[in-house]
Amino acid sequence: MAEKLRHNDHRVIGPKLNLYQQSELIGSGLPLFPWQGEVVINELQNFLRDLLNKNDYKFVRTPHLAKIALFKKSGHWDNYRDDMFLTKSGNEKLAVKPMSCPLHTMIFKQESHSYKDLPKRYAEFATVYRDEASGALTGLSRVRMITQDDAHIFCDVNSLDQELSNLVKLVKQVYAVIGFKKVRVELSTRPTKYVGNIDTWNRAEEILGEVMKKNRLKFSINKGDGAFYGPKIDFHVEDANKKSWQLATIQLDFNLGPRLNATYTNKADKKEHPIIIHRALLGSLERMFGILIEHYNGAFPTWLSPTQVKVISFNDEMEKYTRTIEQKIRAAGIRVEGDYRSETVQLKVRDAEKQKVPYIIVIGGKEKANKTLAVRPRGSKPKFGVKMPDFLKQVKNEIKNRTI
């Protein structure tokens, strides 16, 4: 296993496949993502966006900066000050947001809501910044630029139980698609530094425990590891290398609504503060990317692969015809690249294999004459005489169904 891990490190595989880069001139913990890496992250976002739209989430957008006064009112200043990047504009003191919950709460606050409108679900692929210690930074696992698949659900006590159960199901659904089979669950309780009163905290912890029991989740107690504003359910997954990662989180918050004076009108026509559920499914997209590089050993399933098909011309005479094949595949919505170098087929195939492309197509005289394809699926022997419509149908189905 140690030998396997040595060869399956995202810090080695990632730069080798040009999935991400780092530059001393830019700074530690601030990775660059060339197009190959952007494709993978974008596909993860598309997957989540489709799923969340079906679950009635509304996507919002918030600034990267806000007045320090906002974070003082929300409680983040007292609890996250050491990890915040600070700046100013004239005499106005600003902070780079370490998380988006205060800004999502301000959106809710500035709208008019009745109890009939709840729950409200706001989602954002939000990039936040935290001043992590330089010694703790490593690859994509610990960075200063953190893009969260962030969401906040504003609800009342009547909808709380169902919302929490729906989130448990959503987490299971996401991990089934990605291919995480071993999941461990923890209930993280009140930390030493917290806001609010103990009675509210105790009730919040009870609610999360009841939801997990109702959904038949075995869980352990992680004492003192809750967020400063509320307890949480943390999901730990085991990847293909048997490494354990804390990823999804469902956090229950009775404190932020009152602190920022966010309200809705209840059945008695009186103002009431919403209960806020903070949740992330993948957590940090950068960290998830690093995990998936190792989980798949760089050989992403077709729907996630930067290049899904590599088309290779047998020789220079086949270049013009091979380019028409490439164009037809691209027109079908498949990510395809061509290799028309004046090199041997063996060398070009070997290079495509090193890039871990799911499908390699070689076009020679026989393929041109018969209007067929020679297709080499990743890790398999080539298949000859494949018809273009059959090939396109297969690949498009893999992409549509997000086949692992």
Image (spheres, rainbow, N blue to C red):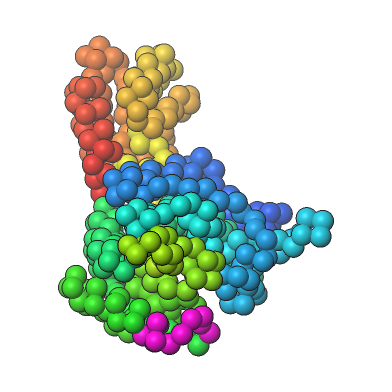
Between 382 and 355, the residue placed more toward the observer is 355
- Point out residue 311 in the picture as x, y percentages from the top left corner: 37, 28
Query: Is residue 346 on the magenta stretch?
Result: no
Q: Quadrant of residue 309?
A: top left
Q: Quadrant of residue 222?
A: bottom left
Query: Is residue 195 on the magenta stretch?
Result: yes
In the rendered structure, the answer to whether residue 57 lies left or right of residue 255 reads left
Between 144 and 355, the residue placed more toward the observer is 144
Is residue 250 placed above or below 361 in the rendered structure?
below
Is residue 108 placed above or below 187 in the rendered structure?
above
Question: Can you name the residue that lies furthest to the top here?
Answer: 369
Is residue 114 placed above or below 135 in the rendered structure?
above
- Residue at 63 percent across and 71 percent down: it is 72
Between 167 and 18, the residue placed more toward the observer is 167
- Residue at 34 percent across and 82 percent down: it is 203
- Point out residue 85 in the picture as x, y percentages from the top left corner: 68, 64
Query: Which residues make up the magenta segment?
Result: 193-202
